Amino acid sequence: MFAEQMMRMVAGLLVGIWVARYLGPAQFGLFSYALAFTALFSSIAKLGLDSIMVRDLVREPTQRDVYMGTAFWLKIIGAITMLGVIGIALQLTTSDSTTKLYVFIIASGAIFQSFEVVDFYYQSKVLSKFISICKLIQLFSSSLIKIYLIYIGSGLFWFVMVSLVDQVTLAITMYLAYRYQKINNFFNFFDRRLAKKLLIDSWPLILSGLAVMIYMRIDQIMIKEMLGEKEVGIYSAATRISEVCYFIPVLIANSIFPSIVNSKGISEKLYYSRMERLYRFMFWSAIAIAIPVTLLGEMIVTSLYGQAYREAGIVLMIHIWAGVFVFIGVGSSNWFICEGLQKYATVNTIVGGVANVLLNLLLIPIYGIYGAAVATIISYCMAAYLMNFFFGVTRKNFYRMSRAIIYIK
C-alpha cells in the first residue's frame, strides 16, 4: 500500500507536470476545472460507504454477498444521481458546451467506481495488497497512455478520456482480483432494508464529504468563473506542488494513532503529552517544508512547468503555508476520534468551506489567484485550528495545539 501511494505521488507529479507543460496554462486550466467540478460532487456517488462497509463486512462476514451487492447497486444509483446534480449545477455556470462535455466524461467514471465494493471486501480481510496491485496497474497504464498522447500531439479531449479509462481499467482489475478468489458474484444481491440501514449510517459522511470537497476544490471553480481558464491552470500548477506532501501527516498520524489510543487508557496526562508532541512535530515538519519552498517558489515552478507558468511561483509561495494547518488538522483528527467528537470535526470543515467561498468572493476580484491562495490559508486555519476555540468540548484541544505551536512545556 505504501509503495502504491509513493508511486502514485511520483507518477502523478512527474506525468502531471509533463501534461501541464504540453497543454499550456489555458488548456490545463480547463482540464483542472473539469476535474475539480466533478470532485465537488463525488461524495454523492461514494455515499460515504467506505468505512461503514469495511466495518460491517468484518462484523458479518457470512453476509458478504448481500452487503457487497447492496452497496454496489447503491453506488450505481448514487453515480447516476451525481450526474443529474452535475447537469443542474452546470446550468448555473458560464461553461460552454465543450467544458460541460469534459465534465460529464470525467463524471461518468463514477459509475465504474461502484466496483470499490471489492476494495471494501479486501480491506475487511486485511488483503489490501491485491487492490494496491490493481491500482498500480491502473497507474502504470494511465501514465503510459498520457505519455503516448503527448508524443503523438493529441488534443485535450483525449486526456479527458484517459480520466474515464482510468476508472474503467481499475474496475476491471478489481473485478478480476475478486474473481481470483473463486467466490460468488455479488451483482444478483440487493436488500432494501439493508440499503436503508446503510444510507441512515452514511448520510452524515455524505455531507461531510461534500463539505471537504467544497473546502478543497471550490477555489479552482470560482477562479474559472471569475478570472478564466488560464488562471485556473496557473493556480492548479502551484497547488499540485504544495499538496504533494499532504500524504506525510497521514502516514505520521496513522503510525502514532495506536500509541495515542493506548495512552488514553493509561492516564490523561500521558495522553495529552503525546498529543502535544504530535502537534509540535506536525507543526515544525510543515514549517520545515514551507520555508524553503517560499524562498525557492518561483525557481521551482519555472524549472518544473516552464516560463508559461511563472505566475504560479508566487501562488506556491503563499499556498504552501496552508500545509501548516493541514498537518495540524490531520494530527487533530486523532483527538476527535479518541474523544468520539467527529461531528465537531465535520462542523469545523463545513465552516471552513463556507469561509473559503466567502473569502474567495472577497479576495479574488481584488488580488486574483493570489487572493485565492490567501483565502485557502485563512479557511484552513479556521477549520483545523481556530474553530476548536468556539465549542466547550473542543476548547481543550485548541489550548493543547496552541501550547504545542508556541512550545510551552
Image (spheres, rainbow, N blue to C red):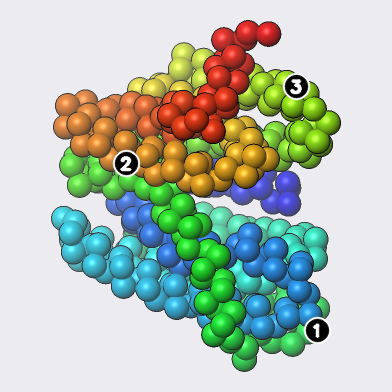
Please tell me the numbered disc located at residue 301: none
- Badge 3 marks a residue whose secondary structure is helix
Depth check, front residue: 149 or 73:
73
At label 1, counting other C-alpha atoms closer than 10 Å, the crowd grade (few under 14, some 14-19, many 20 or more) is: few
Quarter of image, res 123:
bottom right
Closer to viewer: mark 3 or mark 2: 3
The residue shown at (18%, 64%) is 91
Q: Is residue 402 left or right of residue 281?
A: left
Q: Is residue 401 left or right of residue 300?
A: right
Question: Three-letter amino acid code at disc 2?
Answer: Val
At label 2, counting other C-alpha atoms closer than 10 Å, the crowd grade (few under 14, some 14-19, many 20 or more) is: some
Closer to viewer: mark 3 or mark 1: 3
Q: Mark 3 or mark 1, which has the lower sequence index? A: 1
Task: Give the answer, above or below, for where 65 lies relative to 243.
Answer: below
Alpha carbon of mark 3 to alpha carbon of mark 2: how far? Answer: 36 Å
Residue hosting label 2: 354
| Quarter of the C terminus within the rendering | top right
Residue hosting label 3: 269
Q: Mark 3 or mark 2, which has the lower sequence index? A: 3
Please tell me the numbered disc located at residue 182: 1
- Badge 2 marks a residue whose secondary structure is helix
The residue shown at (48%, 58%) is 204
- Where's residue 297, x and y in %? 44, 21
Q: Mark 1 or mark 2, which has the lower sequence index? A: 1
Question: Three-letter amino acid code at disc 3?
Answer: Lys
